[in-house]
Image (spheres, rainbow, N blue to C red):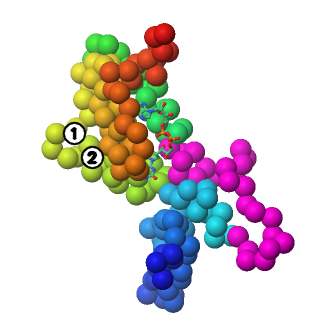
Amino acid sequence: PADTTTTTTASEPPKKFPKGIVLGKDGKPCRSCTSFAAWASQTKKSTTTTPKPPTAVPKDCPPDVETLGRSGWTLLHSIAATYPTQPTSAEQSDVRSFMRLFARLYPCWTCGEDFTRYMASGNKPVRTGSRDELGTWLCEAHNEVNRKLGKEVFDCARWEERWRTGWKD
Ligand code: FAD
């Protein structure tokens, strides 16, 4: 059926999961790749007496893909906001390595693999020549994900107001 995800391994019969559950490379549901709403739906019981699951991730629960994403972008944009205006070649090399490893280690593996592909695609390697170059590159990378998810794109001329100086009124 269209509302389930099916997986199988050589030793186990196929398992079905509700739509929206992203599987990890081990074939099990990947919590940090899945929205809380989809995650909660797999534990929902069909009886009418069962209380509805909460709609937002409780503060003391492992992060879903959205909570993790907001924290991830906050870290990345804040790194750009404090990056030197005239970085040394060592600082440029550090930020390139960081982005590569960040994408490889990112707990939502599908997100990380897409980010790795974005950086590898011909004209999109990390731009590290100055704070503004890095901040604008990151804003464009974030917009690529926004487009993929059907979210509004952000005006990259204003990345520094959002992440460093605060809004000009
Ligand atoms: P977020 O997109 O998290 O943005 C946080 C804040 O950043 C916004 O409130 C806004 O003020 C500001 N902002 C928005 N756009 C920009 C921009 N272009 N430049 C600067 N600031 C901006 N989720 C998936 O479901 N699938 C994916 O493949 C996926 N890939 C991701 C890859 C990476 C590297 C990261 C860090 C996250 C990824 N996410 C992915 C998570 C997703 O991007 C969002 O973080 C999540 O959906 C929560 O979105 P949000 O609307 O709260 O705002």
Q: What element does badge 1 sit on? A: loop
- What is the span of residues highlighted in magenta in the rendered image? 44-69
Q: Is residue 7 above or below residue 147?
A: below
| Residue, disc 1 | 124
| Residue 20 vs residue 74, the one in the foreground | 20
| Residue, disc 2 | 118
Q: What element does badge 2 sit on? A: helix
Q: Where is residue 9 in the image (x, y as percent from the top left)?
A: 45, 83
- Callout 2 crowding tier (Cα within 10 Å): few <14, some 14–19, many ≥20: some
Q: In this view, does 4 lie to the left or right of 137?
A: right
Q: Position of residue 129 (x, y in %)?
A: 24, 21
Question: Could you give the CA–CA distance between mark 2 and mark 1, rounded to whole angstroms?
Answer: 6 Å
Q: Position of residue 12 (x, y in %)?
A: 51, 87
* Marks 2,1: beta carbons within 8 A: yes
Q: Residue at x 73, y 61 (%)?
A: 53
Q: Residue at x 50, y 86 (%)?
A: 14
| Residue 68 vs residue 25, the one in the foreground | 68
The amino acid on which the numbered mark 1 sits, given as a three-letter code, is Lys
Ligand 1 occupies quarter: top left
Q: Is residue 149 magenta?
A: no
